[in-house]
Image (cartoon, helix red, strand yellow):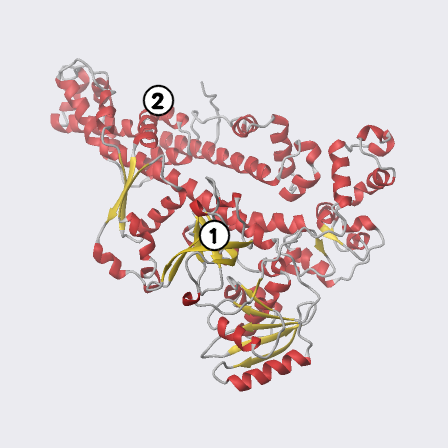
Amino acid sequence: MTEIIEEETTKFVSTNLIAEPNFIDWVSKELGLKDFQTKAVLDLVGEWATTPFIARYRKEVTGDLDENMIRDIVSLREKQEKIWKMKNTAINTIDEMVKLTPELLENIIKAITLKEVEEIYKPYKSKKKTKAMIAIEKGFQVIADYIKAWEEFKNTSEFVNLLKENKEEEIIEGSKEIIAAEIVANAEIREFLRSYLEKKSNIVSKIKWEKSIEKLADNIKKDIYKFDIYSDFEINISKIKPYQILALNRWENLKILTVKLKADKLEEEFLKQFDNDFDTEVWKIYLEAIKAWYKTLYKSVENEVMWELSEIAEDDAISVFQTNLSALLMTKPEYGKKILAFDPGYRTGCKIVVLDEWANPIEFSKIFLHSENNAKILIKKLLEKHNIEIVIVWNGTASNETVELVQSISEVPIYIVNESGASVYSASKIAQEEFKDLDLTDRWTISIGRRFIDPLSELVKVPVWSIWVGMYQHDMPEKKLEEKLGYVVEDTVNKVGINVNTASVYVLNHISWIDKRAAKKIYKNRPYKNREQLKKVLSDSVYEQAIWFLRIPESPEKLDNTDIHPEQYEFAKYVIDNRIFSIDKVSAEIRKDFTEVTLRFVRDAYSKIWEDPRVNSAHKKASKKIEIDDVEIWMIVDGTVRNVVAFGAFVDIGLKNDWLVHISQLANKFISDPNEIVSVWDKVKVKITEIYKEKGKIQLSMKDV
């Protein structure tokens, strides 16, 4: 039985409050961990240790848990605490209203999810009294109890007394309202319905109102063909894909579809629970109460099930986004070359910026495509004046024409860069801080050029939701999306390790424990000759947690350019110099608190000195422009994967749009996840299997290529 807290205070506090659960035990069982691992993580987080710090440098105490598991521990702990607090809030509030019955208390205690607690608590949060509440206040609860026990009540003293001030019909109807409200809140009954719906129901969607499509914005109307399949759609709940749930949610939110769960025999199965051999008036009243509120109960549980499906679908979509974003952020930097970057356009012209070897803007200009000769003269002049080694063009309006123009006068390599998020950055406070004297279009053009030079440094300035490497990101809860994608940025920056003498304030700000103030302080006081000099800039606590992730390649101390912490230097040098491969070979004096895990970490970190884990290039070299008339069925062409989603991958083959390779066409075998085969920015060969010239569409396959 649940332990109860007895508490005395000046404010009303229910004596029925639930004691704080053993969160460590619960989380450990849920994740299949040992209690010491969960406790170690929660203790470290309580001491303000960050996830990257714990994952990399506290392996000994956590049992080698990675970032994802650490976050799962923290997330589950917070989730369970929210449920516990919500239960106590519900109990306290309802008890204070003098409406907390033993049945209601038991239902709240048995509730498993936060949504379930909220559904039970909802009627009591409302300022408007429900019919059941009014009936309880009038004293009808005792009659409801007789009816629930299938006992005759009309000859009882309680009923006779109630008849003095109330009509018989009013007493019976009020008692039915009380019974119905209790059934709606009953945890076991709700669980029966939920279990049935989760196993046997179908999800059904239908067009709500044809004319509602006419009210949609033009940019939404053009995408409606993508959702034709859902206009008259039915599928078993066990077979629906997460991305289909998101599609249904989008249409339903636009008021185009109605989406429901259909369970033909559920009501019949539900009522069987209350079957008996009686045929009395009391039994009929009881059955009427149940039937009257079945629809309300069903709708409540249906909402719960659909909400849970949406949660799973959102998590799945965000997981896909995280994978794609990680691949994008791990793009190899290309410092050391002078660059000419173009922001193409027709009416307002093409903006141009020259960037030096370290991505600093040194000259701006503009050309107009309709004035071809003048444009060629200006471009040629800039190429020669600055010894330009690479030209960058963003993949938007007039990009093909700009590429053709440059190709007609020079053989300098041209690369196409995806600009998603650049417009958001150019109007942001960060851009204004970085380039106070430049206008929005110049900032945009600089950002495009820098996307090629160092994607990680540039993309950390952009709100992650504006980077199009996922699906349905604008349908996701913004806070949840930012948090989950923020983890990817945090992990990537800390995984790469940052050169403090070249990193921007915005990259430094993502390092464990370094806030904006500390980042500016580091930036202002550079260059640094070794890690020791950072001690004068950072507080002891920040230095201890952040220094692992900060590199100084110029330092005479080689270990200053590794993941190894200064507190490990003595141990590391002993292990490396003496070629130690077992902790047993290390003297007790040197060993201290270090373990076999530390030894493996040190050897691995030292073996990667001077290495940058970013090795893949995401940039597509511009080739000759092609149109749909230039391709033929069964032609095999080179492409670049631009986006990976649950149902396939979108590939750029040089046409205006990226085209889908469906998951069924990615390999000569069954795969459940496209990431098994491809990642964002992979270079692939694809086969053209269908061409629809009238629609300007093509279909691609990677089978047998």
Q: In the rendering, at what x and y percent does residue 697 appear?
A: 38, 60
Compared with 274, 318 (above or below) is below
Q: Secondary structure at mark 2?
A: helix
Q: In the rendering, at what x and y percent does residue 309 appear?
A: 38, 39
The circle on residue 102 is 2
The N terminus appears in which quarter of the rendering?
top left
Measuring 36% from the left and 26% from the top, which residue is drawn there?
Answer: 107
Which residue has dot 1 on it? 470
Q: Residues within 10 Å of mark 2 (few under 14, many from 20)?
A: few
Measuring 61% from the left and 65% from the top, which residue is drawn there?
Answer: 450
Front residue of this view, candidates 636 and 81: 636
Q: In the rendering, at what x and y percent does residue 567 appear?
A: 80, 42
Q: Quadrant of residue 292?
A: top left
Is residue 107 visible in the rendered image? The answer is: yes
Q: Secondary structure at mark 1?
A: loop
Front residue of this view, candidates 5 and 84: 84
Measured Cα–Cα span from mark 1 to mark 2: 48 Å
Image check: 405 left or right of 83?
A: right
Q: Are marks 1 and 2 in contact (CB under 8 Å)?
A: no
Disc 1 residue type?
Gly
